[in-house]
Image (cartoon, rainbow, N blue to C red):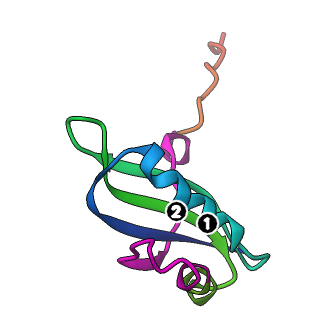
Amino acid sequence: MAKYIAVHTLPQPTTPEELTPLVEELLRHEALDAYWVGAWAETNEEGKALRIFCEWNANSAEAVKKVFAKVPAFPLDHIRPMAKFDSDSFRMPVRQPQAPIP
């Protein structure tokens, strides 16, 4: 399955508790061809979410859009293909010290 990122700009700063009903509704509409993996939030100084970036595993961006179409109250800016990198993706293998040549 491919990975997608769904970007959501919220209409106002929002707490996780305020987002819970929308997320629960969204989870009820997940499908075998599109399911939510996790999310990151851009927050303000009060810790309220301004924008959310959701990682999805899906057969296509259209499959993700179909899930969101069932929850129209959940804002959706766009869905894009993604690749996930972490710091280990860029680390060089550690070389073992060579024994001195006698």
Decide: few, some or many residues near mark 2? Use Cα within 10 Å; few <14, some 14-19, many ≥20. some
Q: Position of residue 73 (x, y in %)?
A: 44, 74
Q: Nearer the viewer, residue 30 or 34?
A: 30
Residue of label 1: 25
Q: Please name the residue shown 43% across and 50% down the image.
A: 18
Q: Nearer the viewer, residue 62 or 23?
A: 23
Secondary structure of the residue carrying tag 1 is: helix
Residue lying farthest to the top in this orientation: 102
Q: Please name the residue shown 59% across and 37% down the image.
A: 93
Query: What are the residue bounds of the magenta stretch?
Result: 67-91
Give above or below for 23 relative to 49: below
Which numbered tag is attached to residue 22? 2
Q: How many marks?
A: 2
Q: Position of residue 5 (x, y in %)?
A: 49, 69
Using the numbered discs, state the Cα–Cα distance from disc 1 to disc 2 in whole angstroms. Answer: 5 Å
> Which corner quadrant of the image does residue 68 belong to?
bottom right
Mark 1 vs 2: CB contact within 8 A = yes
Residue lying farthest to the left in this orientation: 45
Which numbered tag is attached to residue 69? none
Secondary structure of the residue carrying tag 2 is: helix
Q: Is residue 30 highlighted in magenta? A: no
Give above or below for 21 relative to 91: below
Give the residue type at disc 2. Leu
> Which corner quadrant of the image does residue 4 belong to?
bottom right
Query: Is residue 22 found left or right of 35 in the rendered image?
Result: left
Give the residue type at disc 1. Glu
